[in-house]
Amino acid sequence: MALSTRSGPAERSAGGEHGHRLGAAQGTALLVGAVLGPGVLALPHLAAEAAGPASIVVWAALLVISAPVALTFAVLGARFPDGGGVATFAARAFGPRTAAVVGWCFYAAVPLGVLSGALIGGDYVASAVGVGRPWPLVVAVALLAGAFVTNHGGLRTSGRVQLVLVCVLVVVLAVAILASGPDVRTGNFTPFAPHGGSGVVHAAGLLFFAFAGWEAVTHLSADFADPERLLPRATGLALLIVGTLYLGLAIAVVGVLGDRAAASPVPLSLLLQEGIGDLARETTGVVAVILTFIAVNTYIAGGARLGAALARDGALPAGLARGAAAGQVPHRSLLLLAGLTGLLTAVAVPSGLGLDTLMRATAACLAAVTLVGMAAATRLLSRGGRRHGRALAGAATVFTGLMLLSCGLFLLLPAAVATVGALVVRGRGLHNSTRSRIDLGC
């Protein structure tokens, strides 16, 4: 069976009532939501706990590393717009079996990632309101349910909601950074690396979670009104917004809170208290809801379209393929993701599976997907005289490979998913040898 990696004219125009196409503003909002998610609520604490003030260097390094990754995905998405995202790029570069396995890894990461995000949001909201168990879990489930329902309404609904929420989010976080600026103390930056190099590596593996959203929007590339023009523009704007906010928050949290940054699981609440006083609790609750919803919303949107694309191409049951065309809503894939997320919640919460574990597992899966995407780009962008694109992708491949190694034993998860996926797609008749039958469009 040959893997179809190009949406045909009829398929691309068939949207029906859900045929809304994304513009630059909505695309930027979805990208910002995918990257600047609820991780920013917890990661400054976890990174400071692991590496102390040296975590700021890790934040800065990952921002530099994420730029070529983000731009490479933008170039690939603009050139090969399709709901399969990274799986589509892998199919064109390495063949259908590799593409299917990569798709499985991303699809498996979605329930892990959205549950992690929702639990972070639930903890912050419960802290802001002043309630204990079981309310954090109740809030998390409500956020997940809201995101799944919104996505069933199509990208017209989710894209507009995302745009409004991201605008509010950027304003609130910018106020938090600027208002706390006068309280930064140089003494809070010493000792700079209390846990040595191992702490820095530990923080790097964890913080990849904060930068692992760039591949999510590639699954929405076919839903842009003009992917070749609008996707790179949206990516550039998102890089600027995310970079400014992440680095500003990292410096402010360490510089203002000092040792409290590593001790408190809600550093943003403390930072807002320093900056705006009594309004901090309510503001933190609002920020937590917005951050959680926009990230979960984007990952669900991208994951659902990937599932439909995988089913369309034979890597998942054909019944899930409905809604795979650009502009349509993959209702069945959404329902499957909702079921998998519910199952994971039912297992993870009673067993006491920690947030750190969930986030590291997500980061490992997404790092593996990103590495394959960058490797595919080095091959695809070498065609047609795109030497600069190949150099960019090559640098991104090296950087991502180093980040993948920092995931340690959590690499066993994507390895296990890839093994199961390979066995399934082999049984369904997908072979990399069929790559010669794929229209590469180069």
Image (cartoon, helix red, strand yellow):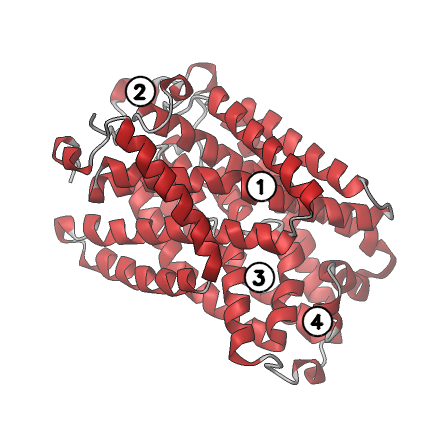
Instruction: Please identify the residue farthest to the top as the structure is shown.
Output: 16
Residue 411 vertical position relative to residue 164 in the rendered view, above or below: below
For mark 4, give the secondary structure: helix
Label at residue 246: 3
Which of label 2 and label 1 is nearer to you?
1
Label at residue 114: 1
What residue is rendered at 46% in x and 49% in y?
A: 413
Neighbor class of circle 1 (other Cα within 10 Å; few <14, some 14-19, many 20+) is many
For mark 2, give the secondary structure: helix
Residue 2 vertical position relative to residue 417 in the rendered view, above or below: above
Per the model, the C-alpha gap separating discs 1 and 4 is 32 Å
For mark 3, give the secondary structure: helix
**Mark 1 vs 4, N-terminal side:** 1
**Mark 2 vs 4, N-terminal side:** 2
Neighbor class of circle 3 (other Cα within 10 Å; few <14, some 14-19, many 20+) is many
Nearest the viewer among 346 and 247 is: 346
Amino acid type at circle 2 is Glu
Per the model, the C-alpha gap separating discs 2 and 1 is 29 Å
Label at residue 11: 2
Which of label 1 and label 3 is nearer to you?
1
Q: Is residue 233 visible?
A: no
Per the model, the C-alpha gap separating discs 2 and 4 is 52 Å
Could you say where residue 370 lies in the image, as x and y percent from the top left?
Answer: 38, 51
What residue is rendered at 62% in x and 76% in y?
A: 53
What residue is rendered at 56% in x and 74% in y?
A: 199
